[in-house]
Image (cartoon, rainbow, N blue to C red):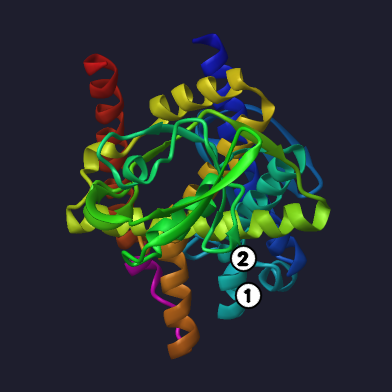
């Protein structure tokens, strides 16, 4: 339990810091005066003023914020110099850049974290067969447990993912599969069958299979700096699409909202991954950083996405959305966020009680 608590503090602390650092750096770049940089909400635990900014660690470690001059004050009296450095006096495009920098930094962090994972080495399943289902296409063709598939229709195969793709894309066409068995290679003719299966969201789909199961054999694949960075971009894009699709599936009712998890689930995941080593923990950080970036872009007033909506309206109309309307919207958004937090805490507790 202690390890889970420490690991989740490190995980959330890093992700929140990265997010707020994005806002902070772009605000400073445009000359906006930053009054406070806080990790956490609520009462200040410790703090130190450096220059014009107070850096604080607050009591509730479920977020953070960067407070800028002129960001929320209604009728503040500012000197001409301060007015020039006020967030409110910036152009709409600058405001958009400052607000968008938080989620963008989360995506950049994910790319770099994934790159570290791929540079260190990722275990990849080989094309060795684990089990063969009786009466399946593979069984009828003579494929045996322990065989290594080396080619499908003259295309070399070395990884299980390549094999799955080749079979799925066969459209039911008979495949010439070359297997390595002992000291010889055998070419076997296999006809994939269309079956019903479920995807990661639990939806029933139709796909082609030949009745084989993956083995436990893996190889460690390392990438050079360029390859690792390229893989990091690909993984970040893939997980971003998957996160967005998951949110759509929840709205559509395909995925139950009960699948949502909160800080307790994150703590359990963090503790589990840190026990496996630094690399799995960094991988989890990358995935959660993407989740944080995507969720913050939702058009809920209290989140970055809500602020972006206001500033996009300002950019199009040339008029600032009234502070009164923004405050009402943010109160509603905050209320919705509190309800969501209560709901995910309930899910976490229910999950613990039923396990």
Q: Secondary structure at mark 1?
A: helix
Name the residue: 39% across, 65% down.
Answer: 170
Q: Which residues are magenta?
A: 319-326
Q: Is residue 98 left or right of residue 131?
A: right
What numbered label is drawn on residue 217?
none
* Mark-to-mark CA distance, 1 and 2: 6 Å
* Residue 88 placement: quadrant: bottom right
The residue beneath circle 1 is 94
Residue 90 location (% of width, % of height): 62, 75
Residue 279 location (% of width, % of height): 67, 32
Residue 38 visible in the snapshot:
no
Say few, some or many: other residues with alpha carbon within 10 Å of mark 2 (under 14 / 14 to 19 / 20 or more). many
Q: Is residue 150 left or right of residue 209?
A: right
The one nearer the camera, 312 or 324, is 312
Q: Are marks 1 and 2 in contact (CB under 8 Å)?
A: yes
Is 228 rendered above or below residue 48? below
């Amino acid at each position: 339990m202690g390890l889970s608590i420490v690991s989740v503090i490190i995980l959330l602390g890093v992700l929140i810091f990265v997010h707020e650092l994005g806002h902070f750096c772009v605000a400073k770049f445009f000359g906006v005066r930053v009054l406070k940089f806080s990790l956490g909400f609520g009462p200040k635990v410790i703090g130190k003023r450096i220059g014009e900014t107070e850096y604080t660690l607050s009591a509730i470690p479920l977020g953070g914020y960067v407070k800028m001059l002129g960001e929320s004050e209604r009728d503040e009296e500012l000197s001409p110099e301060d007015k020039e450095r006020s967030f409110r006096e910036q152009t709409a495009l600058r405001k958009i850049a400052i607000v968008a920098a938080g989620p963008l930094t989360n995506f950049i962090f994910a790319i770099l974290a994934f790159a570290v994972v791929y540079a260190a080495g990722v275990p990849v399943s080989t094309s060795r067969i684990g089990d063969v289902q009786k009466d399946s296409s593979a069984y009828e063709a003579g494929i045996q447990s322990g065989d290594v598939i080396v080619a499908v229709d003259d295309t070399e195969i070395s990884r299980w993912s390549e094999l799955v793709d080749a079979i799925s894309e066969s459209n039911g066409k008979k495949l010439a599969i070359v297997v390595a068995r002992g000291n010889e290679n055998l070419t076997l003719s296999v006809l994939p069958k269309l079956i019903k299966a479920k995807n990661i969201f639990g939806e029933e789909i139709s796909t082609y299979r030949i009745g084989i199961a993956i083995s436990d054999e893996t190889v460690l694949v390392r990438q050079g700096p360029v390859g690792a960075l390229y893989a990091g971009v690909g993984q970040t894009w893939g997980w971003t699409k998957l996160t967005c699709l998951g949110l759509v599936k929840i709205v559509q009712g395909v995925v139950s909202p009960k699948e949502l998890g909160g800080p307790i689930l994150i703590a359990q995941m963090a503790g589990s991954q840190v026990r496996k080593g630094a690399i799995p923990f960094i991988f989890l950080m990358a995935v959660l950083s993407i989740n944080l970036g995507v969720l913050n872009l939702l058009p809920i007033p209290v989140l970055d996405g809500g602020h972006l909506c206001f500033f996009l309206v300002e950019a199009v109309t040339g008029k600032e959305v009234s502070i009164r309307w923004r405050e009402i919207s943010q109160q509603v958004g905050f209320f919705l966020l509190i309800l969501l937090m209560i709901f995910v805490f309930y899910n976490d507790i229910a999950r613990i009680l039923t396990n």
